[in-house]
Amino acid sequence: MNIDKMEFLNWMDRIMRRFDLLDENLNNIGKQKSNIDGEELLDNQDLLLMLKISPRSLQRYRSQGKLPYYTISGKVYYKLSDVHQFVKDSLAVRRFG
């Protein structure tokens, strides 16, 4: 199968425009944060990286009621304000405990 140079360039241009659209859509999806009551939600992975703790420690904080959480469609989320309060409470216990 032979195609001329102009036809090939037109095809490549169409393909590149598709890639640009896909890239834009992926960027928009990535920018969307989960929210509840207008507040940002974090998932387990976010907290593990943020707090530099193990999955077991995170589970223990949930089980002990130290860190409030929400389950949405089988996935666990945490309100950012609850995480901030958890950190403040943890620091207060270490300082005065």
Image: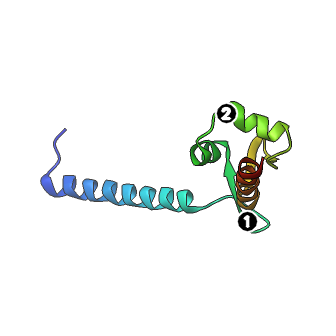
Indicate the amino acid at tag 1: Glu
Q: Position of residue 71 (x, y in %)?
A: 81, 45
Disc 1 on helix, strand or loop?
A: strand
Q: Position of residue 73 (x, y in %)?
A: 78, 44
Horizontally, residue 53 falls left or right of residue 85, namely: left
Q: Position of residue 28 (x, y in %)?
A: 52, 62
- Earlier-in-chain disc, 1 versus 2: 1
Q: Residues within 10 Å of mark 1 (few under 14, many from 20)?
A: few
Asked whether the residues under the numbered discs 1 and 2 touch, taking CB atoms below 8 Å apart as contact, a structural biologist would say no
Front one among 15 and 91: 91
Q: Residue furthest top?
A: 56
Quarter of the image containing the N terminus?
Answer: top left
The Cα atoms of the two marked residues, 1 and 2, are separated by 24 Å
Front one among 96 and 10: 96
Residue at left 61%, top 46%?
51
Q: What colour scheme has been applied to the protein in the rendered image? A: rainbow
Horizontally, residue 30 falls left or right of residue 88, namely: left
Question: Which label belongs to residue 49?
Answer: none
For label 2, the residue is: 55
Residue at left 78%, top 46%?
97
Question: Which label belongs to residue 39?
Answer: 1
